[in-house]
Amino acid sequence: MTDPKEIEKAYEQARQRYAELGVDTEAAMKRLSSTAISLHCWQGDDVGGFEKTEEGLSGGGIMATGAYPGKARTADELRMDLEKTLSLIPGKHRLNLHAMYAETKGKVERNELSAEHFTAWIDWAKANGLGMDFNGTFFSHPKAESGFTLSSADEGIRRFWVEHGIACRKIGAAMGKQLGTACVTNLWIPDGYKDIPVDRKGPRERLKKSLDEIFAEPMDRSYLLDSVESKLFGIGSESYVVGSHEFYLAYAIENKTLLCLDTGHFHPTEVVSDKISSVLTFLDEILLHVSRGVRWDSDHVVILSDELRAIAQQLIRGDYLQRVHIGLDFFDASINRVAAWVIGTRCMFKALLIALLEPTGKLRQMEIIGDYTSRLAMLEELKTLPFGAVWDYYCKTKDVPSGPDWLKEVKDYEAKVTNLRQG
């Protein structure tokens, strides 16, 4: 276990190093403490959900790979795993829930879901001091097997999913009202074609019609924030996705919804870090789904990559933290699922801390006067400054394990809890 005295000693040295650059480490940690990350429930059970149907889940292009033992089989087990995860992560938290995690005591169709089917989740979030975010589940369902939901040419199918979207907004608003913090309710659909389509116009016109119907009822923004999410391609929609980035960007601007930028939903040569300042020039707020695509939208566990650091830098340099809602979105079934949550969330907080420890004012002044030599030199020097000592101290102040100490707790939990789960 890391020696607390060594942590404090290392932190004091780091504090002085940063102070020489005009950076207040205490202020950075204080600001980090006010930043909430929304943990995605679907990492804990491989995007399975708790719908009990004879047909099983089907359709929609969602796939978690791997067969690591011990995944959550019930809502209680999933909440237990989340509680363990939360005990190992510093800072503020939220829970991001999908509609397929409803607890219904029998079959309830998705277009008939209501807040009562999420009472246990809301009560749990309230007891743990968490805000909640919500997502409609427009995949893994017989009515999604054609590859089309809100843009379907079949009016019965299209109407079913419109009703689901309307129900989800009401559920999200109820969550926000009961928890006293606005619920970001996000909408993503898998609609598209595997091969090159003839008609690109029709599905997009139907999608716009469906969205207009879903968002027709005004909702109190103190309870509900609507968001729409694009994607470049997906399984079964490699050649054409109805809800493209351009489509949803235009829709969000025109209808004043949030735009969700998922870091795995763009071409490998595109980076979300460069899109943030562009879209926030025209939108009041956005949602980030932080993932890690590898060659394609593979939703790997978030690591402290160059792009994650660049995203955090943009949030801090642009003073966007109050306008950006940060959620995680990955699902890895090949490693310990609690560890995946902990690694990804801690890395997101680390990236934000690194950005907060940057002398942004000085760097901006160098840029304004055209001293690009000093700007480059300073940016490179910052990379080797002891942010890790500040991170360890921050974890200590939040009473969570510093350094790799958290892994032992995960291994103990695995031996005593998740390894005992069968089936």
Image: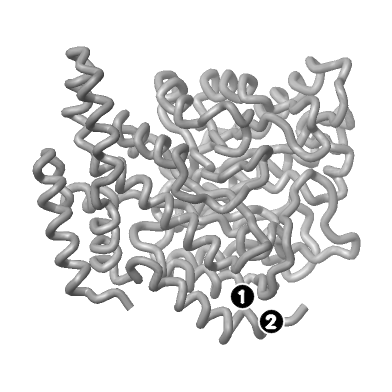
Residue pointed to by mark 1: 77
- Mark toward the start of the polypeptide (2 vs 1): 1
Q: Amino acid at mark 1?
A: Glu
Residue at point 87%, 36% (across, down)? 156
Q: Amino acid at mark 2?
A: Arg
**Residue 421 tag number:** 2
Q: Is residue 105 left or right of residue 341?
A: right
Measured from the top left, where is residue 309 in percent x and y? 40, 40
- Residue toward you, 132 or 197: 197
Q: Residue furthest top?
A: 370
The alpha-carbon separation of the residues under discs 2 and 1 comes to: 10 Å
Quadrant hosting residue 252? top right
Q: Residues within 10 Å of mark 1 (few under 14, many from 20)?
A: some
Mark 1: secondary structure: helix
In the rendered view, would you say 112 is above or below 378? Answer: below
Q: Is residue 132 left or right of residue 192?
A: left
Quadrant hosting residue 378? top left
Residue at point 61%, 42% (across, down)? 293
Residue at point 51%, 82% (across, down)? 412
Discs 2, 1 touching: Cβ within 8 Å:
yes
- Residue toward you, 223 or 417: 417
Mark 2: secondary structure: loop
Residue at point 52%, 61% (across, down)? 341
Q: Is residue 413 left or right of residue 240?
A: left
Q: Is residue 263 left or right of residue 34?
A: right
For the N terminus, the quadrant is bottom left
Measured from the top left, where is residue 361 in percent x and y? 18, 29
For the C terminus, the quadrant is bottom right
Count of marks, rendered view: 2
Measured from the top left, where is residue 366 in percent x and y? 19, 21
Please state which of the two labelled residues, at mark 2 or mark 1, is closer to the viewer: 2
